[in-house]
Every structure is written in structure tokens, then in C-alpha cells.
Amino acid sequence: MVVLVLLGGSLWWVSTGHGGGRHQHPLGTPPQPMPVPPNRISLQGWKLTIPEKDKSGHAGVIEPAAVEPPWLTESPDGSLSFWAPVRGATTPHSQHARTELDSLSNFAASTSGPHTLKAASAVLQVPTDTQDIILGQIHGAGAISSVPYVMLHYRGGTIEVVARQQQNGSQTLSFPLLNGVPLNQRFSFTISDIGNGTMVFSATYGTQTKQATAQVPQNFHDATVRFQVGDYQQAHDSSDTEDGGRVTFYQIDELTTTP
């Protein structure tokens, strides 16, 4: 049953039912569910590494991934902001603190069909000494989970991919993509393993797009790997607790297609 009531010169409606429940709202404005941001980034299928110590004294892991202030926050527009201080906790095999998503879906490098990480981001703050943040990776998984493999760097406005050539060793190849990408400006990038022994990297800022192609090194063929994406700042050291990397992501997608 609905009853109209005049209160303070405004019409209100009162709904009553058999259970005695009662709800009052201004006429014509019943409660509405909170809208879901149209561009919300899904965290399904990821775990999150944060620069906060766990019981072992190393960087903590949240699985499945979830928003975790102050390290990972969500804005009303659905974007995600990552904060990684230089002085944060690190993983056992790294000297650099990170706030980073690790994919829960491993794949075989070069032999399992196309796999693409597609992202759009803006770097808001870089560590003072190196100005370097790794935004996206193909990283070793399974038996080689401690081995970095392909890393897309934002370094002082330059976007460059560095690909390791050996599982044990320091030899790398570099693939420059873009220069002159300022802080606080949105750009996009892709990292792809095509599945035929070839990798493709690309970055776009404004009207500029650059693409590079690389071969999967022989000793990474069929290796178990995964995507990682976020704010993996590369500072050497700092005494400032506010020094570090801040990055906002507007898109993070893991695709089984070519770029």
C-alpha cells in the first residue's frame, strides 16, 4: 500500500507491507544503486604485490588482488592509482619496492599462441635519482619465477623495452619506443608474445606511435612466464619517505590476441 503524506510543503510517499517494513523517499526519487564506473579496471585474474612487510619481512601479497590504500586506490572514474615508495618492503629477489599486479594466468613463451598486455597510464611521480619505473613486464613464472624477462620502462620521459637474453646472465637488448612523454600525461602501450617466436612492443602518446619487434631468445622458448603491470620503481636509494613512483592506470587488459 502507498500513502501520500504532505511534510514541510513536499509530497513524500510511504510504502508499507505485510512484514511491517516501511521506507520513505521524496516522491519520484526511490533509491538507486551506485553506478559502476564505465571504465573500471577488473582485478579478477591478478594478485597484488605491495611494499609493506608480511610475516616473513618481505613485500606482502594480496591474492586475489584488491584495492589496498595507500598502495592501490580506485578513483570514481574507475582508474587505479599505484604508489611505491623507495623505502618500501621488497621481494626476496629484488632491491626495489613495487606495487604491482601479477597475472594468475601463466603461458609458454613463444609457443602458446598470442598473448598481449594492453594498458593506458600516466606517470605522476618518478623516483628522484633514476626517474625510472617499470610499468609492464613479461616475467618468469613457475620454475623461473625469480627471473625478469621483458620490461617496459618509463625513464625521465622516455619509454623503452629491455629484454633479457639469458635466464642466467645479464645480457639484454633495448628497444626504444618514445621520447618526450611528460609526467601527468596519458599514454598507452602493448607488450605481446605473438606465439611464433616473435614479440611486438608498442607505445602511443598523442599522435605518436612507435612499434618494435624482437625475437624470443632461444633459452626462453617454451619457458613458463606471466604478465606483470603496475609501479615497479627503480630507485637506488633515498632517505625521503615520500620519494618513489606514482602511476595511474586507465586500462589494464590481458588478451589472447595480437596487438
Image (cartoon, rainbow, N blue to C red):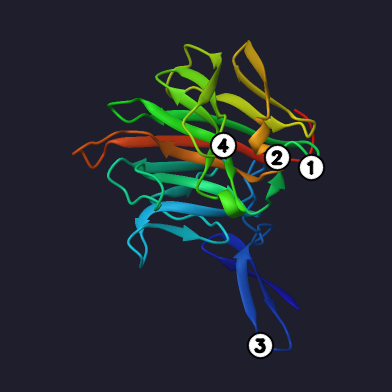
Q: CA distance from mark 1 to mark 2?
A: 7 Å
In the picture, the quarter occupied by the C terminus is top right
Question: In terms of secondary structure, where does tag 4 sit?
Answer: strand
Badge 4 amino acid: Gln
Does residue 1 appear in the picture of this structure?
yes
Q: CA distance from mark 2 to mark 4?
A: 13 Å
Disc number placed over residue 137 in the picture, else none = 4
Residue at 65% from the left image edge and 30% from the top image edge? 217
The mark closer to the camera, 3 or 2, is 2
- Residue 40 image-quadrant placement: top right
Residue at 79% from the left image edge and 42% from the top image edge? 112
- Viewed as shown, does residue 233 lie left or right of 220? left
User: Which of these two is toward me, 236 or 83?
Assistant: 236
Badge 2 amino acid: Ala
Image location of residue 148, percent across then percent down: 52, 39
Image location of residue 30, percent across then percent down: 67, 61
